[in-house]
């Protein structure tokens, strides 16, 4: 099961800590069901992306594959389509029965910044194995924009779990939907049970191409401007994005290597005893990837005192190799619900400074919300 806010806090500040830092871990890094990890002060430009063998450390690979390295200072520029490895400030010493998964923060995924966690002796991205002890590293690849980063920037987050099974099956999800309401239509009304589609351990969600005038955004291929990831509400959207208007045909053609922000037709809700994650890629869905970033925290779309009709899930979408046609109501992704070990003492809400509630696709917090 997934550890909540108070348990993560115990792992940091308790009598037997498992999470440490080269500096100070702020309580602001602790989310309802995850911990924000922060960038250290050194950057290694590598010749390629990589995964370690079971007998390799990341540092051994860096010694062989680093082209050059430099100090990470405020406003350090990273160039598109280049691979960088940055040691994180946090390091861990997990108990044998505890493991973790990592994911980019939503604001990072929505600017096309591809980040993945690396661990010593672990040939798998975004996974910390049970009982892991050691340093954590982040692979950072800007895919669309020139970005400026800073020491202590939170670019990804990690969710800690016990060895117990945490995925919620179809029958339990249906019971939770009957009790709380998990999936809603665009008007905020709960979907009837027969209208909820299940597959491969999750709820299948569909693409929204018609509920509003602007149904999404396409990133401009312009590297003359940089996005400072420490800024909030700083940038004019038009300088970096083209709005996608509702297609009259009910179809949208995804062009290979373009980056899109789109939204689900359904609105989702997470009662405090649940968290979730969208499966990043399903080979059966076609030549595209439909999600790059973001865990869904307990309380997302739920409201202060019960269901509020849910919140749209925003998707980071790319087509690969060939153009790909999306049609009205087509399945675009899979939402997986997870059970929390305990109800978090803090849940997702406006009080936490939450940015991504409401309907429709939203740009990252770095942009003025003039198109919303």
Image (tube, rainbow, N blue to C red):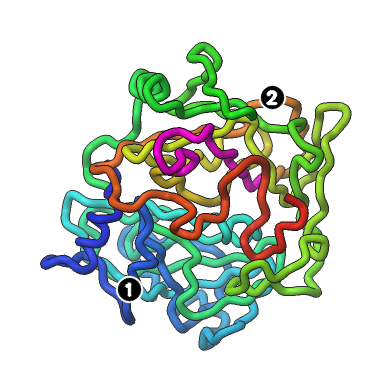
For marks 1 and 2 on the same chain, the one whose residue lies earlier in the sequence: 1
Q: Which mark is residue 137?
A: none
Residue occupying the far left of the picture:
15
> Which residue position holds label 2?
329
Between the C-alphas of marks 1 and 2, the distance is: 43 Å
On whether residue 303 falls in the magenta region, the answer is: yes
User: Does 279 sit above or below residue 34?
Assistant: above
Which residue occupies 46% across, 61% down?
156
Q: In the rendering, which numbered label is found on residue 25?
A: 1
**Vertical placement of 307 versus 98: above or below?**
above
Residue that extends furthest to the top in the rendered view of this protein: 194
Q: Residues within 10 Å of mark 1 (few under 14, many from 20)?
A: some
* Residue 200 left/right relative to 293: left
Q: Main secondary structure of the magenta part?
A: loop
Residue 39 in view here: yes
Residue at the spot x=35%, y=38% of the render? 274
- Where on the picture, by quarter, is residue 146? bottom right
Q: Quadrant of residue 63?
A: bottom left
- Provide residue 264's location: percent of width, then percent of height: 63, 35
Q: Which residues are magenta?
A: 300-317
The stretch drawn in magenta includes residue 340: no
Tell me where residue 118 appears, x and y as whole percent: 41, 62
Task: Tell me if 239 is positioned left or right of 294 in this view.
Answer: right
Question: What residue sits 68% from the left and 26% below the top?
Answer: 330
- Graded by Cα atoms within 10 Å as few (under 14), some (14 to 19) or many (20 or more), the crowding at tag 2 reads some
Q: Secondary structure at mark 1?
A: loop
Q: Is residue 35 above or below residue 43?
A: above
Query: Which element is circle 2 on?
Result: loop
């Amino acid at each position: 099961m997934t550890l909540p806010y108070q348990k993560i806090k115990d792992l940091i500040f308790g009598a037997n800590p498992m999470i440490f830092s080269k500096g100070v871990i702020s309580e602001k890094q602790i989310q309802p069901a995850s911990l924000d990890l922060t960038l250290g002060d050194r950057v290694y430009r590598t010749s390629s992306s990589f995964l370690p063998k079971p007998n390799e450390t990341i540092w051994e690979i860096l010694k062989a594959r680093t082209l050059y390295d430099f100090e990470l200072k405020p406003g350090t520029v990273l160039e598109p389509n280049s691979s960088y490895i940055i040691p994180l400030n946090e390091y861990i010493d997990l108990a044998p029965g505890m493991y973790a998964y990592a994911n980019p923060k939503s604001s990072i995924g929505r600017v096309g910044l591809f980040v993945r966690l690396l661990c010593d002796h672990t040939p798998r991205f975004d996974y910390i194995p049970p009982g892991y002890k050691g340093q954590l590293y982040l692979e950072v690849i800007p895919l669309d924009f020139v970005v400026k980063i800073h020491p202590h920037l939170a670019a990804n987050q990690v969710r800690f779990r016990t060895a117990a099974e945490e995925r919620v099956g179809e029958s339990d999800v249906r019971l939770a939907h009957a009790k709380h309401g998990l999936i809603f239509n665009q008007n905020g009304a709960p979907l009837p049970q027969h209208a909820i589609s299940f597959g491969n351990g999750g709820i299948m969600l569909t693409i929204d191409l018609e509920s509003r005038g602007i149904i999404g955004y396409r990133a401009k291929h312009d590297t003359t401007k940089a996005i400072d990831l420490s800024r909030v509400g700083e940038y004019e959207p038009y300088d970096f994005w083209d709005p996608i208007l509702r297609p009259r045909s009910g179809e949208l053609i995804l062009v290979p290597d373009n980056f899109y922000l789109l939204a689900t037709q359904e609105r989702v809700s997470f009662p405090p005893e649940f968290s979730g994650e969208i499966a990043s890629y399903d080979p059966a869905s076609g030549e595209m990837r439909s999600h790059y970033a973001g865990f869904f925290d307990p309380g997302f779309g739920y409201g202060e005192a019960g269901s509020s009709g849910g919140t749209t899930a925003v998707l980071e979408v790319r087509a690969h190799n060939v153009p790909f046609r999306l049609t009205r109501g087509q399945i675009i992704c899979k939402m997986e619900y997870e059970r929390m070990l305990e109800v978090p003492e803090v849940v997702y809400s406006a009080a936490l400074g939450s940015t991504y509630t409401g309907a429709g696709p939203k740009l990252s917090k770095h942009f003025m919300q003039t198109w919303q």
